[in-house]
Image (cartoon, rainbow, N blue to C red):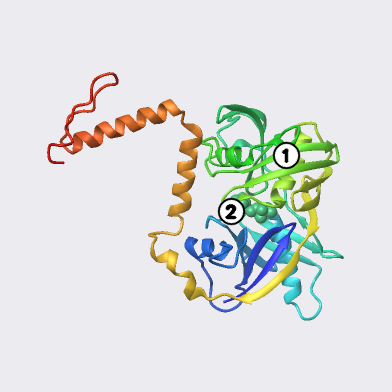
Amino acid sequence: MEFAKYQGLGNDFVIVDGRSGSPIEPNGAQVRQLCDRRLGIGADGVILALPPRQGGDLRMRIFNGDGSEPEMCGNGIRCLARFVADQHQGVCPDTLTIETMAGPMGARLQDQGQVTVDMGEPRLEPAAIPTTLGVDARQVVAERLLVIGQVLEVTAVSMGNPHVVIPVADVAQVDLEQLGPALETHPAFPNRTNVHFLQVLSDQHHRLRTWERGVGPTMACGTGACAAVVAARLLGLGQRKARVTLPGGTLTVHWRDDNHVFMTGPAQRTFVGQVVLDALGAEAENEATGDTEAVAQAKAMAFLANTSLDEMLELAANSLAQRTQRRGGPPVNPPGEPVPDWDHRGH
Ligand code: ZDP
């Protein structure tokens, strides 16, 4: 199968052209392996270019590295627009309408490898995120949330996909590996969420560190940069137009007065090649369904993040008691009583 690799600020994607020929439908295991930097090609996600359904130029599907399918992807859509332009031998229209699960997005090819995307309108209602925070509110701004023993003030924005933004004094001090997954899988976000820590450099320039849903820490997140500018504005920390500096570089975001968010940044082809799909079947054979592992992992993370040590010990004790009783052994002793030596009775 032929593929191209593109990157935008170090957020990298395998792009497969499914605009002609038979439809392609990768399973979760195949996506994970394509994204694996040793067992496959290596990428943060896989993007499919597909024929349009609603009068656009093409349709985009995107998969995260864990095999899950998000609604939208900002860096990915810039990469896809550049991919389409690179495929064109002759003149390519400089504006493309790309259909996504979050609606049609307009992408304009600019000079010097830059692409501007009309990312549509942010959604702020709790149900649109979705989140259980601020149920009766119109928006979720600086809501307090307990995450692994810390109270964080989170602002939630949907750019088609869910984001939470947390202002901090210094993003370098944030323990992303701990807080990222705990927030991603927090029960307050039923579809999980992308997580961003925001440092205000000025009212027109922010620094962002991202933990992406279904991926982990990435060099950049386009939808996240848009969500961050919207959140900063809602919090009174920034203007509607601002630069956002991510580990991989800087995007320009403009939340216009007509409520549309425009994002400008680079997109670049890094290589093209062929991948042997037969070699990608191995992991798939060991799994009943593509999503099982991702979902199980998310549940485990949520459990770990949101269960106290005492609760875990109690659960473990209960489950030991149940298993012991199923095996016909004596009930497990309440704490403080001596443990009988029943294991030698032929178990
Ligand atoms: O919403 C999600 O699950 C994200 N991981 C999708 C990918 C977002 C992306 N990094 C972006 O730039 O918007 C591609």
> Residue extending furthest bottom?
89
Q: Amino acid at mark 1?
A: Ala
Q: Amino acid at mark 2?
A: Pro
> Residue extending furthest left?
345
Instruction: Please state which of residues 174 and 168 is positioned toward the viewer in this rendering.
Output: 174
Disc 2 secondary structure class: loop
Q: Which residue is mark 2?
A: 70
Report crowding for label 1: few under 14, some 14 to 19, many 20 or more residues within 10 A (C-alpha): few
Q: In which quadrant is the C terminus drawn?
A: top left
Residue depicted at 45% across the width and 53% down the height = 293
Instruction: Please state which of residues 196 and 149 is positioned toward the viewer in this rendering.
Output: 149
Quarter of the rendering containing residue 273: bottom right
**Place of residue 241 in the rendered image (x, y in percent of width and height, measured from the top left):** 84, 44
Please indicate whether residue 127 sits to the left or right of residue 96 in the image. Answer: left
**Place of residue 17 in the rendered image (x, y in percent of width and height, measured from the top left):** 63, 73
Q: Which residue is mark 1?
A: 172
Disc 2: residue Cβ within 8 A of ligand 1's nearest atom: yes
**Place of residue 207 in the rendered image (x, y in percent of width and height, measured from the top left):** 78, 42
Which of pointers 2 and 1 indicates the residue nearer the eye? Answer: 1
Please indicate whether residue 258 sits to the left or right of residue 21 in the image. Answer: right
Figure disc tally? 2
Which badge, 2 or 1, is on the more N-terminal residue? Answer: 2
Residue depicted at 81% across the width and 77% down the height = 91
Residue depicted at 57% across the width and 57% down the height = 65
Q: In which quadrant is the N terminus drawn?
A: bottom right
Instruction: Please state which of residues 272 and 203 is positioned toward the viewer in this rendering.
Output: 272
